[in-house]
Amino acid sequence: MTALLHTLAVLAGVGLVGGTVMSAVRSTVLPRSAHRGLSRATLRGTRWVLGLTVGRSGSYEQRDRVMALLGPLSLLALLAAWLILTLVGFGLIYLGTGIGSVDRAVELSGSSVFTLGTTAAHRIGVDLLTYVEAAIGLLLVTLLITYLPSIYGAFSRRENGVHLLRVRAGDPPRAAALLIRYWIIDDTHARLSDLWQMWEGWFADVEETHTTFAVLPFFRSPRPQESWITAAGALLDAASLWMAAVVHDADPYAALCVRSGFQTLRRIGEMFRIPFDEEPNPSDPISITRDEWEAAVTEMANAGLPVKPDRDQAWRAFRGWRVNYDTVLLSLARILEARPDVPWISDRSPVWLQGRPARGFLGRIR
């Protein structure tokens, strides 16, 4: 190799290794949402492979079983990508420092990154580089290992809320069912205020964790019938119905819960580049029809809830709340392939289109 090619090989190797280390830091250490090209690529690639495995003709339960592997496998694929890129990067550096053939450079780099110690250069400068590569290899593995408890801790907290909502809102979860159940248990409304406060905190935790750990939204619930996005939608609809259609004492916590919820969905939606209006007009159209809403309100009235007599004003109020999260909620339900029969959520943003799974928007994740 000429001196110029040696220099270019070293520069390319340094750039590749530096980019890999920065990808690992952004993915596991940086406490904020950031552009992660390598993470995005491994996630998309893993989903593509799993999609080929399940095809487009299986049942939802079959697809759910396969797609439940997406999160864990994409993390393993990300670690493999880090190690391979580090191996290639240092291989280029070794070539640039005159180590000899490509075979020799790959052998030395592989021995170093996996800390096997089977090959040595017997040159002080190159030996020092092998120590650096071994340290980086250990660092990458350690970062992922320490990353896993944070992911599964956040997953556990999220799923605890999902399970509690299933007990309260039914299966599949429905906003009207949640309000009716609470009315039967306690018609003083005090327990509902506690619920709104609990879920305001749940939304805050989900926003922080699911934008920091970009793979976490794809970790599916243990039960195929459950999903964090459908649980979030049912809770938001319940709070919106409560404020818009039910006579009750002043309850600021419901409004705070809805605001926390739609801001959380929007921040997660930004990772997928879902278009939405930051300041929607309360009169903008929503995916729920007036007849569907009337049926839910009538069900609540028949159960004894004190429904507001002015249905027109109540409908306008509900629509003014729902418009804040309608678009991003339905888009996320489709991207995450949520159970396709949840009223007002995934039943109109279906995983299944004409009997086939809908195409997700994973290519948009950033």
Image: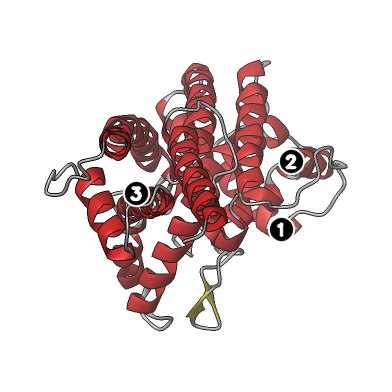
- Mark 2 or mark 3, which is nearer to you? 3
Q: Give the structural element (helix, strand or loop) at label 1.
A: loop
Q: Mark 3 points at which residue?
A: 75
**Residue 293 appears left or right of 277:** left
Do labels 1 and 3 touch, CB within 8 Å?
no
Amino acid type for the residue under numbered disc 1:
Ser
Residue 285 locus on image (x, y percent): 82, 54
Count residues near mark 1 (Cα–Cα under 10 Å), then give few for <14, some for 14-19, many for 20+. some
Of residue 319 and residue 41, the one placed in the foreground of this image is: 41
Q: Which of marks 2 and 3 is nearer the N terminus?
A: 3
**Is residue 294 in view?**
yes
Q: Mark 2 points at which residue?
A: 324
Residue 184 locus on image (x, y percent): 43, 32
How far apart, in angstroms, are the residues tagged by discs 1 and 3?
Answer: 35 Å
Of residue 124 and residue 247, the one placed in the foreground of this image is: 124
**Residue 150 appears left or right of 298:** left
